[in-house]
Image (cartoon, rainbow, N blue to C red):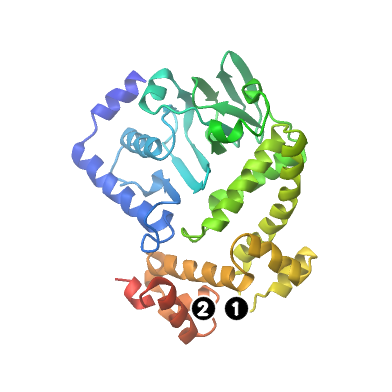
Amino acid sequence: MASQQQHIRALSCENLAHAKHLLVAKVIRVATLSMKASECMHQASFVSKDFDPALQDHEKFALWCENMEALTCCVDITRAEERPFSAFVHWADYAHVHVTRFGGTFSRIRRSKTAISRGPDDDFCLMFHRGEAALNIDQVGREAMLSSQQGFLGTNGLPIDMRSDASFCSTTLTVSRARLLPLVNDVDALLVTPLDLSRPAVAHLKRYIDISVDLVRDPHDQQLDEHISTTLLDLTALALGARGDVAELATARGLRASRAQQIVAEIERNFDDPNFSIGQIAGRLQMSPRYVQDLLQETGLSFTERLLERRLQHAMQLLTSEAGDRLKIGEIALASGFNEISYFNQRYRRRFGETPTQSRR
């Protein structure tokens, strides 16, 4: 830690300021869906490869840690200095929970007493280890060694030490103590105990966290946020062994939510197909079109509304990204699933309050 602090103090202010400028621009452009459509950030994503290439590894590391800490909880991270520095974080907020995928060339991550004092909170973190080597965990005097894909429950309120001989990689669900305590009896007794991967609820939760991190959505779609948040909490309760009425309700909601998740995933995979239809989803998932529509309505939007929104969000991303600079407006419309340019222009202007051309300014 002393070596890391010396590196941070030794950073060139000019280089750091320039790198911060590049990072902020990247986060605003890529991670927030459309800052024109949202006053608050629901998603963020930044990776070390987007930093100024003129920065040294220790400078990139310090900058990455600073932004990681601003986005998630405060932790002390030790680099694997024998390897070139590389790191990423993808984060999303859903009403009452956060989901994160992060990793990098680290050898140790601690939530030390110093880190807790920098950012005190007692949220629970349900983490799935995705690295290649074993992950050694030590919290509240309990130790565990997790193999790849295994998960465990930890807490931000107490010191924790995690070590690995290979690069770190994980997905994490963060939920407040106030939200989780009513769902699971004596939840603190479950800390650091590896989750049973053979249980369907654990497998569903791991998959649902992955989808929730990557899902592109309208930042004003509060009903979808609530739906996903409720599903994540239900699956967490079941994964941690909830019983009685809580388990019964979570199971009933979880079945419909799992099917709704499949539908949303199908839309995500096929929105750029101009001929994509609700009938195709129904056939692939062996559901009736009416049932597909009913499940989507529970998430706040009909099939037509959700498909249109996804296409418009994709078009907005292309129009405001470097990758889309080389494309004509008509090409962007086609790449987003629209086969009529006039209809695309009309819906785009109605949704974002400006024409596609104006979005490029």
Label disc, if present, on residue 19 of the rendered structure: none
Check the image and name the residue furthest to the left: 14
Secondary structure state at the residue bearing disc 2: helix
Alpha carbon distance from label 2 to label 1: 8 Å
Secondary structure state at the residue bearing disc 1: loop
Q: Which residue in the structure is indicated by mark 2?
A: 334
Residue 130, image x, y percentages: 60, 37
Residue 83: quadrant of the picture:
top left
Tell me how many marks there are.
Answer: 2
Q: Is residue 99 above or below residue 219?
A: above
Whether residue 182 is visible: yes
Instruction: Classify 10 Å Cα crowding around label 1: few (below 14), some (14-19), many (20 and above).
Output: some
Q: Earlier in the sequence, mark 2 or mark 1?
A: 1
- Judged left or right of residue 342, residue 132 is right
Residue 118 versus residue 252: which sits nearer the camera? 252
Label disc, if present, on residue 274 of the rendered structure: 1
- Judged left or right of residue 140, residue 37 is left
Q: Is residue 277 above or below residue 76?
A: below
Check the image and name the residue furthest to the top: 141
- Judged left or right of residue 339, residue 241 is right
Name the residue: 40% across, 77% down: 349
Q: On the rendered image, what quadrant is the C terminus found in?
A: bottom left
Residue type marked 2:
Leu
Q: Is residue 57 above or below residue 146?
A: below
Residue 56: quadrant of the picture:
top left
Residue 343 versus residue 333: which sits nearer the camera? 343
Residue type marked 1:
Pro
- Contact between labelled residues 1 and 2, with CB atoms less than 8 Å apart: yes
Q: On the rendered image, what quadrant is the N terminus found in?
A: top left
Residue 74, image x, y percentages: 41, 30
